[in-house]
Amino acid sequence: MRTAAQQARVVVIGAGQAGLSVAWHLQRAGLVAGDDVVVLDRAPGTGGAWQFRWDALRLGLAHRVHDLPGMHEMGLRFDDADRSRPARDVVAEYYRRFEEHHDLRVRRPVAVTSVRRVSAAADTDAGAAAATTSRLVVETRAEDGTVGTIVAEVVVNASGTWGTPFVPWVPGRDVFRGRQLDTTGYRDAADFAGQDVVVVGGGTSGIGFLLELDGVARSTRWFTRRPVVWSEDRALALGAAVAAVEDQDRAARAGRVLPSIVSGTGLPVSRRIRAGLDRGLLRAEPMFTRLDEDGVVTADGEHVHADAVLWATGFRADLRHLAPLQLRTEDGGVVVEDGRSTAEPRLFLAGYGPQASTIGANRAGRRTARQVLTVLAEDAAVAS
Ligand code: FAD
């Protein structure tokens, strides 16, 4: 079934930290949630990608989840939450209370299937406004299969990365007969009880899996494409993190594929990690050269038996629904300056690249909202 085309001033794709932050700032500026600003999310519940994270990722084990703007006035702070609870549950609960308190009227589960430009006078089903000025057309699909169209002056894409885990191609990936899964498929260490597990990836997720599997799996081996750089000095780690965000920004401005944050920063050594290092659990080996039917073959030619290969190899920005806008450069990225697409000025990318952390997404909310309001004011001036 198809519903009649709707109009909105702004469509926000995604109700994670970035999308909610933008929506809240727009509401503060006087736009009406659910009417002027329509927030869509394909996931069933609140919490953005956090709702899908595994049980053992407790709030106290996450890096740090920053409060949404507008949470303090509700007396809500992540720092006051029980750190032993799964981060998934706390974030989902706090975001739900935030959405309800501010009446943000998120529509879910509604997936955005495509965003395209409306060419003047071509889109008869998109409404009169679309025929006179340039607009973006957002196609949606609800859970019951109903498809819809929303014509917007501005689209804020805040779709995160969870939908597009990245798994590198390694020879034999299609030959291995054991279980292969990426970070989004990981639920519980108990699923690997008594198994030989190969973990791939030098980021915090891979390390977390190794620590959780210790004493549960029969064996673990850890492979990374680059040597792991540990960082025991908090000040140095902080400086490196700032440099890594700057790297992300340079890549976004140049339209390159975004580098991984971890590859630039080094991994901070917590007490838990220090214990893992001391007992020899966290010993990264150079990436294996291939998989075979029942394991992997190391660079030295050793065959390592594996029941499961766990790819903790990161994520890419989930921008598939933006394909009709043809934003991809030859270098495989999208050119984004200060959170805005240079190829499509009605499109903002909140939480993208340098903004991809809960604090970055928060800051993006304020800046993006300001820029969106400027576009809306320009549209109003043209229309009058
Ligand atoms: P998300 O939270 O991913 O939200 C995006 C939303 O968009 C989702 O709800 C999704 O359903 C929706 N969506 C996507 N595509 C569509 C579509 N086509 N149509 C409709 N809806 C769509 N950051 C920190 O600051 N601290 C941490 O401790 C931390 N730990 C992390 C641990 C892991 C394992 C990972 C993978 C990341 C972690 N991060 C952490 C990064 C973290 O995910 C981000 O900081 C932040 O939560 C991302 O917010 P976001 O709003 O950009 O994206």
Image (cartoon, rainbow, N blue to C red):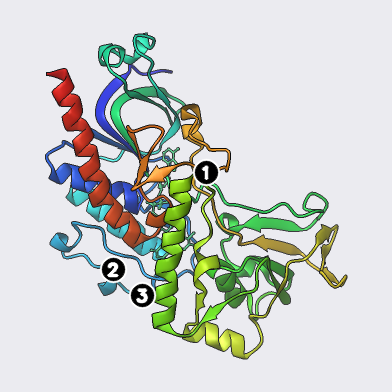
Give the labeled residue for mark 1: 333
Give the image location of residue 365, x and y in percent. Answer: 27, 50
- Tell which circle, 2 or 1, labels the residue nearer the N-terminal end: 2
Residue type highlighted by circle 1 = Gly
Give the image location of residue 329, x and y in percent. Answer: 53, 38
Tag in front: 3 or 1: 1
Instruction: Rate crowding at label 1 as few (under 14), some (14 to 19) or many (20 or more) other CA atoms within 10 Å.
Output: some
Horizontal placement of 260 versus 2: left or right?
right
Horizontal placement of 320 versus 175: left or right?
left
Horizontal placement of 240 versus 166: left or right?
left
Identify the image quadrant of residue 222: bottom right
Give the labeled residue for mark 3: 83
How far apart marks 3 and 1 lie (CA) works out to 37 Å
- Tell which circle, 2 or 3, labels the residue nearer the N-terminal end: 2
> Which secondary structure lies at badge 3?
loop
> Which secondary structure lies at badge 2?
helix
Give the image location of residue 353, x and y in percent. Answer: 43, 53
Give the labeled residue for mark 2: 78
Q: Is residue 38 above or below residue 309?
A: above
Ligand 1 under 8 Å from disc 1 Cβ: no
- Tell which circle, 3 or 1, labels the residue nearer the N-terminal end: 3
- Mark seen at residue 361: none
Asked whether the beta carbons under mark 2 and mark 1 sit within 8 Å of each other, the answer is no
- Is residue 135 at all visible to an observer of this figure? yes
Q: Quadrant of the C terminus?
A: top left
> Which secondary structure lies at badge 1?
loop
Asked whether the beta carbons under mark 3 and mark 1 sit within 8 Å of each other, the answer is no
